[in-house]
Image: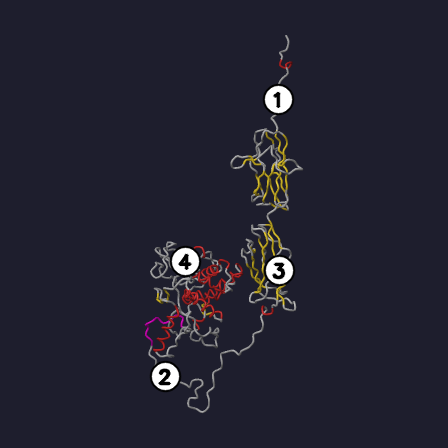
Amino acid sequence: MAAQFGRLRKGAVNTTVAAVVVAALAASQAPGVTTDDAGRKVTTGTQPSADTPPAEDSATGNSPYYTDLPPLNSPNPSPTSSTPVTPGAGEAGIPATVLDAYKKAEAALRESKPGCNLQWQLLAAIGKVESGQARGGRVDANGNTLSPILGPQLNGNGFANISDTDNGAYDGDSSYDRAVGPMQFIPSTWAWAGRDGNGDGEKNPNNVYDAALAAGHYLCRFGWDLSTQGDLDRAILSYNNSRDYLNLVLSWLEYYRKGTHEIPDGTGTLPSDRSDDTAGASPTPTPPGTPTTPSTPSAPSSPKPGDNGGSSSPQPKPPSTTPPSTTPPPTPTDLVDHLEDAGTAKLTAMAGDTFTEKVSTRAETDAGKGIAKVRVRFTIIGATDATFSTGEKYATTLTGSTGEAVAPALKAGENTGEFVVRATVVGRTIAGLDYTATVTERAADTLTRTSDTALTCTPGGEFADQVELKATYKGAVADKVAATATLIKSADDPTENDKGPYFKDADGKTVRTLSDLKTDADGLLKLPKLYADDTAGTFLLRINTAGGATLTVELKVAAAETSPSPTPSESASPSA
């Protein structure tokens, strides 16, 4: 972004200088600056970034936004009863309910997605650019805007072309979509990104609590870590795909990070590019064109600070508002010399299971003393589908009084093999600590038949009953366990038999070994129908599973028993 220009104080410069600065300000903002039907300054003609989503996939549909730049001065301290509100305080401050919504959203994301590292100041920066902090905090006590905040119709006329997706339910427009509410979500995005931030059971884009929480989740998707510049840039660009937008949001983010204060709802300044000396004292800016009362001639001004006013004695200078330069005390993070394992046991789990052990790391000084209140980030690295119990591949926790940080429980996926959990200190560039975790295949230690019915068949026939088994591991159901079934020669010879019972493949051909079998969600495994050739006898079917469970089932093939024929004496008629 081009260099930023601050607000022009009335009377501070002449008309010529003012015109030059305003022209420079317009040039610093975007290729084209216009005003929409809501009276806000918007940019058109900006070039989207090549690595970010199209309009319909962004939060705002790449809608127009306010282009006001932050003041040159840092935010004013919070005014007290003995400190008059200075000009610009309304602009520097954030309306109370809006600020509360941003902070509540940050707290919620800290719990649900700690690895995202979302700061409320980022929400404030986006809220400033999108709606001027809900039009200066024009919201009720529940966070609902007092009137709808709508962007222009996205009809392709200078903006994106997004036909109506909500039948006008959110934006009142059944022809085209419009960005809605304090955080300017388009209806199609709100449909999946909307959240209930104030616990009233509704997801309302016109409610600042709902909108702020939705914006937080939107910015934290894709596993982005907003404490890194690359992910921060990507998240902001996904909200509105413009480099000018990115630079503007980053400038407000930096401004709010330096400090801000709470102001009453409804007293914030509406975005504009003009000077407003009364913005900090008047809840509503004077509409353009309103006549003002002519001022009466003022008395001769008092000498300015540093001007002796014609007197030989120097005038006293005002007290400095800049605090004396001091070296801040070191933070706990500054004291960390290294990370040490805090007794983490071997990390092993079967696919689909939760690891019984947790990764535990200790932040220490160079003397080996534990340091409390240090943020430690745990990251899962490697080709694995394992996650933490939060569903994320990263987690951030604070060290306790002994300097120990414990990661959430690990949850194994279906991919077997090793992966790494890396512990690092947030805010320090020191060597991380790696922990190796292993995921083994699902296993069973016991197999049993679900029926005790004898399995018999006549030569050349088929068995009436199918073999069904149940697999368990340490007494619990063993689901999705791999198994193999083979018709073997004998109990001592597990090689495949070449005669006797058999299965059929999809083409009806004889098969005596079945592989790639798996138990179902209840640990059950039902084998296909068995057939018999012309060989009579007793045969064995052996089933093996991962983990070592084995079961041998007996199959009998014999001719059907027939009733004996009567003897001649039994069939002769009795004598007379």
- Front-lying residue, 528 or 313: 528
Where is residue 541, by image quadrant? top right
Earlier in the chain: of badge 1 and badge 4, it is 4
Question: Where residue 492 appears, x then y in whole percent?
Answer: 67, 37
Left/right placement of residue 240 relative to residue 501 reads left
Q: Amino acid at mark 2?
A: Ser
- Front-lying residue, 537 or 183: 537
- Label disc, if present, on residue 563 of the rendered structure: 1
Quadrant in which the C terminus is drawn: top right
Earlier in the chain: of badge 4 and badge 3, it is 4
Question: Where residue 90 appears, x then y in whole percent?
Answer: 43, 71
Q: Amino acid at mark 4?
A: Pro
Q: CA distance from mark 2 to mark 4?
A: 58 Å
Q: Amino acid at mark 3?
A: Ser
**Circle 3 crowding by C-alpha within 10 Å: few under 14, some 14–19, many from 20:** many
Earlier in the chain: of badge 3 and badge 2, it is 2
Q: Are marks 1 and 4 in contact (CB under 8 Å)?
A: no
